[in-house]
Image (cartoon, rainbow, N blue to C red):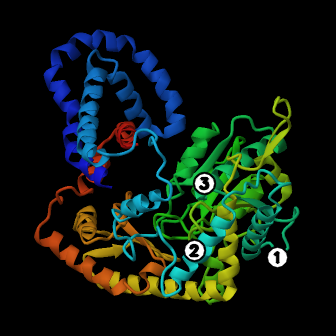
Amino acid sequence: MESLSGLCSYVDEFRGFANQYLSNYEPVVLVMFPILSIVLASFLQSLIGVISDKGLKAALLGVFMSFFKLVPGVQKYIDGEKQKVVNKLQSSDKSKRDGWASELPKSGLGFGVLDRLKDEKANDVAWQGKCSGTVYIAGSESEGHFSLINEACAMFAHTNPLHLDVFQSVVRCEAEVVAMTAALLGSKEKCSGGQICGNMTSGGTESILMAVKSSRDYMKARKGITKPEMIIPVSAHSAYDKAAQYFNIKLWRVPVNKEFQADSRAIGQFINKNTILIVGSAPGFPHGIIDPIEELGELAFKFGICLHVDLCLGGFVLPFARKLGYPIPPFDFSVKGVTSISVDVHKYGLAPKGTSVVLYRNHEIRKCQFVAVTEWTGGLYVSPTMAGSRPGGLIAGAWASLMSVGMEGYLEHTREIMEASKRLQKGLKEISELYIVGRPDMTVVAFGSHNLDIFEINDIMSSKGWHLNALQRPNSIHICITLQHVEVIDGFLKDLRDSVQTVKENPGPVSGGLAPIYGAAGKMPDRGMVGDLLVDFMDSSC
């Protein structure tokens, strides 16, 4: 985060490169005009192809920038400006990396490494009760729960469910975690097509990747689709962008409605003969709002395509909230048309990090997730998920968490966090400068401001130790309430009121804050340039 803050002070400088270039190289541009006119035909031809993928505005800008970079010196200038940013980032980050190990120690440290790890851990920020999401267990029982899952993980740290015949215990743990999760999400309903089934994965992103890959291959086998497309609301998780890139699927992002839900009518207009999948979230990560899963299910069933529901956040909250009497709309396999669901056990399931579940309505769809290799000299090979070897210790830890907490425990946890969410929303409504984005259905609450820079407010909150999530379109921030926050809602609201007052009295970016980068990114017309800057930042940080 500190490195990202260092990026902020250089963003405005980088943004101005185009105007500076044009003012410095105007004669070159005039000389090049005849050449540019010659390539106009090629420009128009490329534009037509890109419009169908990205829309008119983005296509015009993208193609223009592509041809603008062909002007001699422009690309070199851009690369030079980006390198300046990267160099400054590397320079500011260098001091933190001094003393980092770059090769194996000559003599092993043995148990001395534990002391080294304790020293490193002491440098982490104070996250207890201050982070949006991140850590989901808290309270008087947290120490005992951490000890329990840590012991379970350690007991099975050597295991690998790839070896089904050797580690039968952890194979059973995975099967039972999947079955218990499915039981919460409609497996006992009368679902046609066979028994709900699934596998554990390393997290929500892998669960989504697996669901998209399975949907692609299932629709190819069923309908012969070889140029697959999927349609998602703009609020859907960025994991779908990864899936589109990894699996060569055209991705359509559709605007949400005025309630910030997936617009089923708009999504329906994008469905064509190549559509394999549409997506809904319960709730969506940005604003904590449940998409109209029933409407999306009707669409999927009508057109004979797949529907994936992202329950990574809601899987271990919504079933219990419904039992507690909250007005939760249908969201799971009880909805006709839902073909797959992703659920993170390491969030509100309170399992160790790196545990999620992907579920399918039937075995026919799940079989499309598997990879079988018959011609390898190493023997016959089959694997269910992205990874070959998988950490059996995490699977055992997830099983231990579900079995130790139980139905009554999850009901009580859900009652606490849902009540905390309501207290937070009430407090936000009392701060006149802020507004809540949409109507949150669960424990993610997003808020913005009509007259103040919400990112400046976020920077002040960061200086007070709070770690929130910055959002865009609309500019806002959110907090994902966990058991960590149940006892600190009042403190959060007090700090938020003080931060709002500070920005009112002293508007302007905080030194080292994130407001400049979000503000600059929002004004950059070329989103490809924003992406390049993010990639260069990540490359310099790893």
Relative image position of residue 391 (x, y in whole percent):
66, 56
**Cα gap from disc 2 to disc 3, whole angstroms:** 30 Å
**Cα gap from disc 1 to disc 2, whole angstroms:** 22 Å
Q: Residue at x 49, y 77 (%)?
A: 443
Q: Which residue is mark 1?
A: 188
Q: Residue at x 30, y 17 (%)?
A: 71
- Find residue 142 and name its label: none
| Residue 476 in sight | yes
Q: Residue at x 49, y 21 (%)?
A: 45
Q: Residue furthest front?
A: 107
| Residue 432 in sight | no
Relative image position of residue 259 (x, y in whole percent):
48, 69
Is 302 located above or below residue 287 in the figure?
above
Would you say the residues marked 1 and 3 are in contact, meaning their CB atoms lie under 8 Å apart?
A: no
Residue placed most toward the observer, 196 or 302: 196
Marks 1 and 3: which is nearer the front? 1
- Find residue 267 and name its label: 3
Q: Earlier in the sequence, mark 1 or mark 3?
A: 1
Identify which amino acid the numbered label 3 is placed on.
Ile
Is 206 located above or below residue 530 in the figure?
below
